[in-house]
Image (cartoon, grey):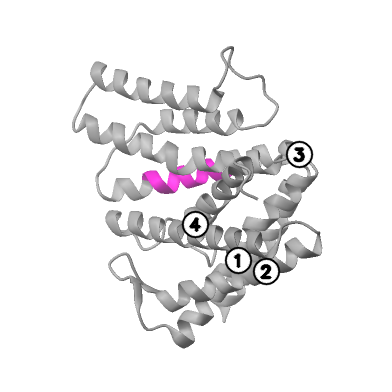
Amino acid sequence: METLSTRVLTAIIGFALVIVAVYFGWITLLPSLLLVAALALREYVQMLDQRDLDVRHRSMYLFGAALIVASVPGLPGPPWAGGSWREVILGFALLYFLVIEVISPGERPLERIVYSLFGLLYIPWLLGYFLLLRYAPNADDGLLYFALPLLATFATDIGGFFAGYYFGRRKLAPEVSPGKTVEGALGGLAASFLLVLVVTRSVGIWSLSDAFIYAALVASASQLGDLSESLIKRSLGAKDSGRSLPGHGGMLDRLDSLLFAVPITYLFLQLGVF
């Protein structure tokens, strides 16, 4: 009961902080994401340390912060057409990692480059989509579209848990996450669809088919994000990514689903699928 109370209290406080950060736009969301990225990168580095895997720590934090800042909508773009500062920073990071290993290679230089670059792609690059989605298609409607993946992911988790608990038989990915079942995944999809349908119809956007397509996409992305983090932890021999959130494990343990669900929402809104 003490663990459950701690878990619930942490969730309530976290939800309240998310509402405040998102509501006031980039001025609160940007520093929040910088903090989240720093905590998540630290957890990632600590998991690597347990397997004696090295990365360029300070460079990762620096480039990670730059990627988050470059995601703020409305910034002047590069002087050439068709690009953004996010791609520029990521390309420069790759070049830097290569050059620094040539100058001072040490042991396993290629391994250090790969893990450093993956950390940037997996955490700050994907977190940057949170800022982009907050202003898609504009600052007002962005609140609604930002809420959709949060609600859909929550519904997917709850629906997946109960469907898996009562009806789960067939394993979804037994070598990655033995607790996941096909029935749980379908239950998560159904719960996500119902919630998305209620929200979108109540505000007069999207048809039944649009809501179903989106729910299928975000539920799949959410579960893939969860499985991906499980794969990383299993590969690195970690049970949890960290202990920064009482009762919930680490920051990455709470972010895993949203790291995929939020970018999917943004990309498909930009592509005009809906």
**Considering only vertical position in the picture, is 111 above or below 248?**
above
Picture layout, residue 219 above or below residue 183: above
Residue 180 horizontal/vertical position (percent): 40, 72
Q: Residue furthest left?
A: 107
- Compare marks 3 and 2 and give the one earlier in the sequence: 3
* Residues shaded magenta: 36-45
- 6 or 164, nearer to the observer: 164
Which quadrant of the figure has residue 9? bottom right
Q: Residue at x 40, y 61 (%)?
A: 227
Q: Is residue 186 visible?
A: yes
Q: Which residue is painted at 47% across and 33% down in the image?
A: 61
- Residue under numbered circle 2: 195
Q: Which residue is mark 1?
A: 154
Q: Dot 4: few (<14), some (14–19), or many (≥20) neighbours within 10 Å?
A: many
Badge 4 element: helix
Closer to viewer: mark 3 or mark 1:
3
Among the two numbered marks 1 and 4 on one chain, the one whose residue lies closer to the N terminus:
1
Q: Which residue is mark 3?
A: 138
The crowd level at tag 3 (other Cα within 10 Å; few <14, some 14-19, many 20+) is few
N-terminal label among 2 and 1 = 1
In the rendered view of the protein, which quadrant contains the N terminus? Answer: bottom right
Q: CA distance from mark 2 to mark 1?
A: 10 Å
Give how far apart the Cα atoms at labels 4 and 2 are: 16 Å
